Amino acid sequence: MLHTPAPAGGQRTCYQEPDMSDAREKPIVFWGAAGQAKVLWDCLRPQGYRLVALFDNNVDLRSPFSTVPLYHGESGFSLWLSSTKALEDEVYCLVAIGGSRGQDRLQIQRYLADHGLRPIVAIHPRASLAEGISVGEGSQILAHAAVGASARIGEACIVNTGAIVEHDCKIGDGVHLAPGSILAGEVTVDAFTMIGAAAVVLPRLNIGKNVVVGAGSVVTKDIADNLVVAGNPAQILSERLQDGPSSP
């Protein structure tokens, strides 16, 4: 969990890139080897991490990084773990799976943690974090995103490029705020929901669990669980099945 303390003298505090000049590189792995892995590595590469392995269930994928091996599925992870455990004191991890797969993201994160890896909070050096926020393990706040005062973000969330979480918002586990989306203050978003690119949720609304808000939508009223909505103003398009998480 990351917390930003309330500043003395009322001055705003933002995340600053850590000085890694005297620190050893920290080994990290990603589960997920497609686009989100590239985005995360762009975020973490200047912060003193060393990407040592990738994992993905898709056997047709190849590693997007020429020097980083890709292992497939739980069997590949077990093979890597057995050969690496004695070589590293501590290995960090993130789940590089975007889209509306928040339940998968959280389940895989807990699987990795159960096997001794340590989820981190990934914050891009060009993200802005206000005072008094909290961010759960495994969450990712990407370039030019902004998180306002007293916001609460759960585990395994993605606040994607340029997304805005205004003051006093509460975001559940496994939520994805797509690029350019806006939560306009005191908004509550329940677990495993995805707010599409450039969508806007007006202040003091409640968005339920396992919801998808379509790209460019404007949400003007509360949304119940397990719905797909879109439009300006957002209207219900369909129900969304509440599937269980897939295996790692």
Image: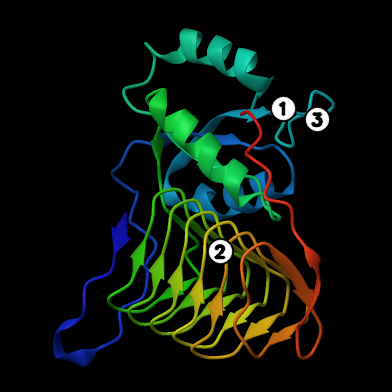
**Residue 61, label in figure:** 3
Q: Is residue 96 left or right of residue 125?
A: right
Whichever of callouts 2 and 3 sits on the residue coming sooner in the sequence is 3
Mark 3 nearby-residue class (10 Å; few <14, some 14–19, many ≥20): some
Residue 41, position as x, y percentages in the image: 59, 47
Q: Which residue is drawn at 73% across and 48% down?
A: 35
Residue 154, position as x, y percentages in the image: 43, 59
Q: What residue type is labelled 3?
A: Leu
Above or below, 24 against 14 in this view is above
Q: Residue at x 68, y 44 (%)?
A: 243
Kindly identify which residue carries mark 2: 142
Residue 23, position as x, y percentages in the image: 30, 41
Measured Cα–Cα span from mark 2 to mark 3: 24 Å
Measured Cα–Cα span from mark 3 to mark 1: 9 Å
Mark 1 nearby-residue class (10 Å; few <14, some 14–19, many ≥20): some
Residue 46, position as x, y percentages in the image: 49, 52
Residue placed most toward the observer, 235 or 59: 235
Q: In which quarter of the image is residue 4?
A: bottom left
Q: Which amino acid does label 2 sit on?
A: Leu
Residue placed most toward the observer, 190 or 161: 190
Kindly identify which residue carries mark 1: 57
User: What's the colour scheme?
Assistant: rainbow
Q: Is mark 3 on a helix, strand or loop?
A: loop
Measured Cα–Cα span from mark 1 to mark 2: 24 Å
